Image (tube, coloured by chain):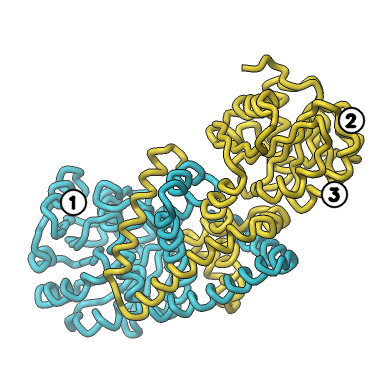
Chain colours: A cyan, B yellow
Amino acid sequence: MVASPLFEKVALIGLGLIGSSLARVIKREGLAGEVIGCARSEKTLATALELGFVDRVEADAAKAVEDADFVVICTPIGAYKAIAEAIAPHLKKGAILSDVGSVKETVLRDLGPLVPEGVHFVPTHPVAGTEHSGPEAGFDGLFEGRWCVLTPMTGTAPEAIERVAELWRRAGSQVEIMDAAHHDKVMAITSHLPHLIAYTIVGTATDLEESERAEIVKFSASGFRDFTRIAASDPVMWRDIFLNNQSAVLEMLGRFTEDLTALQRAIRWGDGQTLEELFARTRAIRRSIIDARQA
Amino acid sequence: MVASPLFEKVALIGLGLIGSSLARVIKREGLAGEVIGCARSEKTLATALELGFVDRVEADAAKAVEDADFVVICTPIGAYKAIAEAIAPHLKKGAILSDVGSVKETVLRDLGPLVPEGVHFVPTHPVAGTEHSGPEAGFDGLFEGRWCVLTPMTGTAPEAIERVAELWRRAGSQVEIMDAAHHDKVMAITSHLPHLIAYTIVGTATDLEESERAEIVKFSASGFRDFTRIAASDPVMWRDIFLNNQSAVLEMLGRFTEDLTALQRAIRWGDGQTLEELFARTRAIRRSIIDARQA
């Protein structure tokens, strides 16, 4: 256990669902002497001050990170590189740099070389979220009972890793340290592919003739609405996830398409046995999830 | 409004989630003088009596329907034909025959010719369900706030249709009369395709290497668990839905696959604009669903 406050000065760059939820946790738990919020939009900064989950706001990332001993990038992944380039010269020696992105290998590859010597880089992925975005959508219970994956490079100072781990434990999460490439593969099937499929089917439905479209809304309770919830997630964040986890997503997508084609064939040829066998098999995994209390 | 009780004697053939929920509604609302439950399995019949949602049980469908003025087939669609052949000679003149299947055109085509003259055939589809099955899974609130679609053939007595409609209104549903083929198309996209996709991706995940499989359960909260819930639905019921709504499902599946292939290509070529445009578009349909209070 590390004594609280864990940090003197925390800078959060990006104040959307995850950033603002993390800020709320840091406030609630008293984990930092000061929390600085940084965002591009004036409106977001005003909201952050008004809701009071930061002590101070700063539009300029380079200024926000000055003297901070913990800096977390909470923007869509596509913005990381520019932010890292802007803040790198201003990071304090001994500071910890972290992020909360859903893809980790490209983050390590792209950000790693930009991290100045003497700064500890501990990439994280809190596996939590809702379909809502923005600073108003955040809440301090978001990470409760969820996993937070840390994917540090070998050679990272254990004290830095432990400090970040403790932060996430205080947020209510279970912390797991994982290889970045393995993390990206697991997320490709549990998160990225489900989102891609949900976006696709909701798009397919939206493209139907007008007469059918009205009824899709009406009869959405029959299965479709679960997909619409997933497909309401932040567009830019998800664009960047797919662009950054390209190979793992394409690999899982290939497997999925093969399996779907086999079922399509079974439907076309009236092969009820193939259908029933698969449908019976998938029930088991639902039970495991209920047993693991992730349902 | 039709005065209650609506029926003297109701026979429900099949006592799973839908059949047993309907029985509970009939009891709660006092819609029938007597409710007879019929099922193949001894265990189901015993459970039905024990839970008390029927007055009497009968293993033989032909006996169950004797003197009944309302008969509802609540089994998977694949069992319909054998049941209809068994009960047809025993249906009372003036009785109403109904069902609760999720596909309607093949039901009309296959059962229609078996319905004796003087018996009113009013196929229905209560658009409600959970991933649980069996007589214990039913509850009288299942149909509350949901739609119930009636797809009678032209020429069906309006009084019979109205009597069935009133039953479902008393169950808390909004009743809609629809052409069977149109119903099947709407359900193909809002319900059948989502289920097929969910079954497929859960199957794809289950086929992964053991090391990844454990982590799928662990990280299911990231999107996957919504699919596992859908993919835990009754295997036999769903097999029969796909076999009976073949052409509409294949049509929607074709559109979906085209759209998915386009996204796959966008990911492969790093075309972020295509991804973001679709992801932004799908948010709108979620809002319509929330506005329609089906979320």
Residues behind callouts 1 and 3 on a single chain: no
Residue found 8% across the figure and 63% down from its top: A60
The disc numbered 3 marks a residue on which chain? B
Q: Is residue A125 left or right of residue B74?
A: left
Location of residue B84 in the rendering, given as x and y in whole percent from the top left corner? 83, 43
Q: Amino acid at mark 1?
A: Val
Q: Is residue B125 left or right of residue B260?
A: right
Location of residue B21 in the rendering, given as x and y in whole percent from the top left corner? 69, 35
Q: Which mark is residue B70?
A: none
Task: Work out whether residue B122 or residue A226 is closer to the camera in this orientation and state it.
Answer: B122
Q: Is residue A96 visible?
A: no
Q: Around disc 3, counting alpha carbons within 10 Å, would you say few (fewer than 14), some (14 to 19), or many (20 or more)?
A: few
Q: Which mark is residue B66?
A: 2
Residue found 34% across the figure and 61% down from its top: B279
Residue found 81% across the figure and 49% down from its top: B81
Q: Amino acid at mark 2?
A: Glu
Residue B1, by quadrant, is top right
Residue at the farthest top position: B3
